[in-house]
Amino acid sequence: MTGTPTPEQIERGRLLFAKPCAFMWSAGAVTDLPPDNVPEVAFAGRSNVGKSSLLNALVGQKALANVSQTPGRTQKLNFFDLDGKLRLVDLPGYGYAKVSKTAVDAWTQLIEDYLRGRPSLRRTLLLIDSRVGIKDSDEAALRVLDDAAVATRVVLTKTDRMKGGELAEQAKAVEDRLKAHAAAFPQVTITSAHSGAGMAELRADIAALLES
């Protein structure tokens, strides 16, 4: 979906994410993945970018996904079932220096194998901390998504901590960087799990995937 969602699209998103959502599966290897029979949306980003907070805000639950003060704790692909119609997949965070190189390499390979070989994957949401913008590790992730030809929506997080002018400048700077990445949509989605900003639009964007 491109542009501003209509009221009808907003309502379809609200209804979808009002359905029951629960943890269903955790995979530490491609051989551990659940059956590939339900559309999936993956959530990717640097450690501590706010993936768990965003997931919780989307489904209106406080503890669906674990919110940790220790970056790098999510070391597997965690699957959440949304009413049997959609799976939300929390990918391991990247870019955390205190994790061993061996662990980083293993996580990276797991993520790349999943992205390249999952026919049911409809979209990857790449979360970027609005306060810091795109880092080298995010560029690397964007290149992986380009290579895998996975449609990617960049989502700016923690925007409630930015002033309006600063946020607009950061959003434009990120969008300028996205021009070099074929798999990424040209416009970013601005969100805040704390204030709820952008949640309705993001729900509508995800719900639209089930209509295609």
Image (spheres, grey):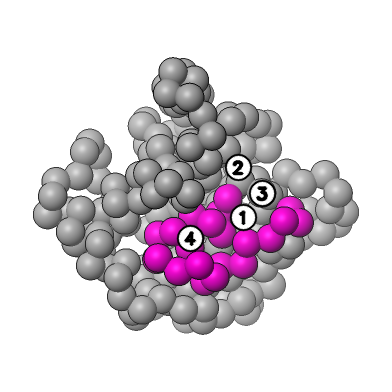
Secondary structure type for disc 3: loop
Distance, label 1 to label 3, CA atoms, is 20 Å
Q: Nearer the viewer, mark 2 or mark 4?
A: 4
Q: Where does label 3 land, which residue? A: 48
Q: Where does label 1 land, which residue? A: 112
Residue drawn at point x = 31 percent, y = 56 percent: 203
Q: Are marks 3 and 2 in contact (CB under 8 Å)?
A: no
Residue drawn at point x = 36 percent, y = 71 percent: 86
Q: Nearer the viewer, mark 1 or mark 2?
A: 2
Q: Nearer the viewer, mark 3 or mark 2?
A: 3
- Is residue 55 inside the magenta stretch? yes
Q: Where does label 2 land, which residue? A: 141
Range shown magenta: 50-72
Name the amino acid type tagged 4. Answer: Leu
Asked whether the viewer can see residue 34, the reply is no
Q: Are marks 3 and 4 in contact (CB under 8 Å)?
A: no
Q: Quadrant of the C terminus?
A: bottom left
Q: Where does label 4 land, which residue? A: 55
Q: Earlier in the sequence, mark 3 or mark 4?
A: 3
